Image (cartoon, grey):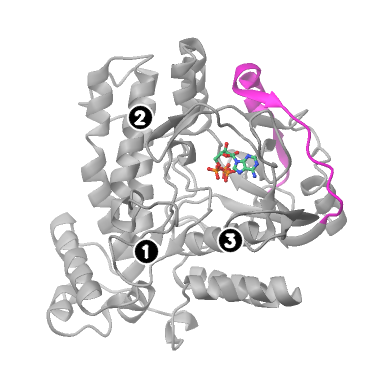
């Protein structure tokens, strides 16, 4: 388990510039009518040496995009394609965002500050390049709640209101605008590789593989893995490992991402792009988040399969560099890795020490049965059964052999767990929309962080990074 991100000095980087001639288009930020700071993530600002900025400086950098010292010379809109709901779309790319800066954290790991809602780019098509304030608020809530539940997620770093009126089909309009900055170990997507396949740029793809292996290091493939000396095969194994863990983290969190397209799959395994997400009100594998997902492609229980399918598209892209068999061998590790990660994460959320795959898997199955039959709201289930408590009948005997963690944090004595159900999200938004009252949101963020502390998140349980501990 990792400690609190260490306060570190600011360490600017420009690694992406090696690739930008073919990976990105230089762009200009929008000139907004106003910049009003709404959220600054000082916890993570400290991790990259930016916590000392005054609010005024913060607005200049993350609302006006005045360059941070010694990092990228110009904002870079990244080029990518992607399968959206299984249909290939070659017309995407950063249409309302760019990589603004790169830096290293206290452990030398590369981080990007990427924007959303910062203006149009060559990839905007007919859209406005903007983000709604409500969309930005939803990004804050999703990232904070996932982080507190141990998922490997991008961090919402900054939200600044920008004073424009936006028109959206899925919000009462006009609606307020914002620009968001997120912190993430990369913005290299599966769709970034798909584009290089379609554009027939194998040399660039090889350079991108090398960049990923160097900047986001991971373990070597297993000793018996075919082709394990090849960079493309190494990257495939690492990405399969990370994505299996990502899929497990969604399931154990009871989280439905909603839009698991290949352009929303970060090579580092970090979850990102929080649009129509929902948390489960009940343990229902068919529960769907996005109103436009009529066929339930990205329903709760289909998320591991969707992520596995995306990995298949990653393998197809890497065929530009290597043979099929070693890639298929890597892909075939997904199922067992997913099962292992689910058992590990499930034990973690319940505060139980793992007893081995067979027993842990049986314990998860018994919990799922109880979740369904007892019609539990999932957060309430995990809260009540923390450290094997409050179980009756079959479940009590399943928990019995487990060594339990002491629940020392006061959170576990609360009457109710923190939840992130849609009604509360709407209530938090109403306070802002109707009264410009930001206090309920601030209180909620504080409560989520307290829940994270109770889980021992301070804040990186499995590492917010692909690097092995
Ligand atoms: N308002 C908009 N203006 C311009 N482009 C947009 C807008 N909304 C979405 N897009 C573009 O449509 C594509 C798919 O959008 P999607 O919602 O998956 O990404 P996003 O939320 O904008 O960004 P990210 O994936 O970086 O979080 C992307 O190319 C995105 O940049």
- How far from the left and from the top, in percent, is residue 168? 64, 54
For mark 2, does the 10 Å Cα neighbourhood hold few (<14), some (14 to 19), or many (20 or more) residues? some
Mark 1 or mark 3, earlier in chain? 3
Name the image quarter holding the N terminus. bottom left
Q: Quadrant of residue 312?
A: top left
Whether residue 406 is visible to the viewer of this picture, yes or no, is: yes
Total numbered circles: 3
- How far from the left and from the top, in percent, is residue 113? 66, 42
For mark 1, does the 10 Å Cα neighbourhood hold few (<14), some (14 to 19), or many (20 or more) residues? many
Near-viewer residue (344 or 7): 344
- How far from the left and from the top, in percent, is residue 60? 85, 48
Up-down relation of residue 215 to residue 451 (above or below): above
Q: Secondary structure at mark 1?
A: loop
Q: What whole-number distance in Å separates the C-alpha atoms at marks 2 and 1? A: 26 Å
For mark 3, does the 10 Å Cα neighbourhood hold few (<14), some (14 to 19), or many (20 or more) residues? many
Rendered residue at 26%/32% (across/down): 331
Q: Quadrant of residue 430?
A: bottom right
Up-down relation of residue 277 to residue 468 (above or below): below
Whether residue 6 is visible to the viewer of this picture, yes or no, is: no
Magenta highlight range: 8-35
Rendered residue at 73%/32% (across/down): 75
Classify residue 284 as left or right of residue 62: left
Instruction: Assess whether residue 146 is covered by the magenta stretch.
Output: no
- How far from the left and from the top, in percent, is residue 30? 80, 41
Q: Nearer the viewer, mark 1 or mark 3?
A: 3
Residue wearing tag 3: 138
Mark 2 or mark 1, earlier in chain? 1
Rendered residue at 26%/44% (across/down): 337
Residue wearing tag 1: 254
Residue wearing tag 2: 313
Q: Secondary structure at mark 2?
A: helix
């Amino acid at each position: 388990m990792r400690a609190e991100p260490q306060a570190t000095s600011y360490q600017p980087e420009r690694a992406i510039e090696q690739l930008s001639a073919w990976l990105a288009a230089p762009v200009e930020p929008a000139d907004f009518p106003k910049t009003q700071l709404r959220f600054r993530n000082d916890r993570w600002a400290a991790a990259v040496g930016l916590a000392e900025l005054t609010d005024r400086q913060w607005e200049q950098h993350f609302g006006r995009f005045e360059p941070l010292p010694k990092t990228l010379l110009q904002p870079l809109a990244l080029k990518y394609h992607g399968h959206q709901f299984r249909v290939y779309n070659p017309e995407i790319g950063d249409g309302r965002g760019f990589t603004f800066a790169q830096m290293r954290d206290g452990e030398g790991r590369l981080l990007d500050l990427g924007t959303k809602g910062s203006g149009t780019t060559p990839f905007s098509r007919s859209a406005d390049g903007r983000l709604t304030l409500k969309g930005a608020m939803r990004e804050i809530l999703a990232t904070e709640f996932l982080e507190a539940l141990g998922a490997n997620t991008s961090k919402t770093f900054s939200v600044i209101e920008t004073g424009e009126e936006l028109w959206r089909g899925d919000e009462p309009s006009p609606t307020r605008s914002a620009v968001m900055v997120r912190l993430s170990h990369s913005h290299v997507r599966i769709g970034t590789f798909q584009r290089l396949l379609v554009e027939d740029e194998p040399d660039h793809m090889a350079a991108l593989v090398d960049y990923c292996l160097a900047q986001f290091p991971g373990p070597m493939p297993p000793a018996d893995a075919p082709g394990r000396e090849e960079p493309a095969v190494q990257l495939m194994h690492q990405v399969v490992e990370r994505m299996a863990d990502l899929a497990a983290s969604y399931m154990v969190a009871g989280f439905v991402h909603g839009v698991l397209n290949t352009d929303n799959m970060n090579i580092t395994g970090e979850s990102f792009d929080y649009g129509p997400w929902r948390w489960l009100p009940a343990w229902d594998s068919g529960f769907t988040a996005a109103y436009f997902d009529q066929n339930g492609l990205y329903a709760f229980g289909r998320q591991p399969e969707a992520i596995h399918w995306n990995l298949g598209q990653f393998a197809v892209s890497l065929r530009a560099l290597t043979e099929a068999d070693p890639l298929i061998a890597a892909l075939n590790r997904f199922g067992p890795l997913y099962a292992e990660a689910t058992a590990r994460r499930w034990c973690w959320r319940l505060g139980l020490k793992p007893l081995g795959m067979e027993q842990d898997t049986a314990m998860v199955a018994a919990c799922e049965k109880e979740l369904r039959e007892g019609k539990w709201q999932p957060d309430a289930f995990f809260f009540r059964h923390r450290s094997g408590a409050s179980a009756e009948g079959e479940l009590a005997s399943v928990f019995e052999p487990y060594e339990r963690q002491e629940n020392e944090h006061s959170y576990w004595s609360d009457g109710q767990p923190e939840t992130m159900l849609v009604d509360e999200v709407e209530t938090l938004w109403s306070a802002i929309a109707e009264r410009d009252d930001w206090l309920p949101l601030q209180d909620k963020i504080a409560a989520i962080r307290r829940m994270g502390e109770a889980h021992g998140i301070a804040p990186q349980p499995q590492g917010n990074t692909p690097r092995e501990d």
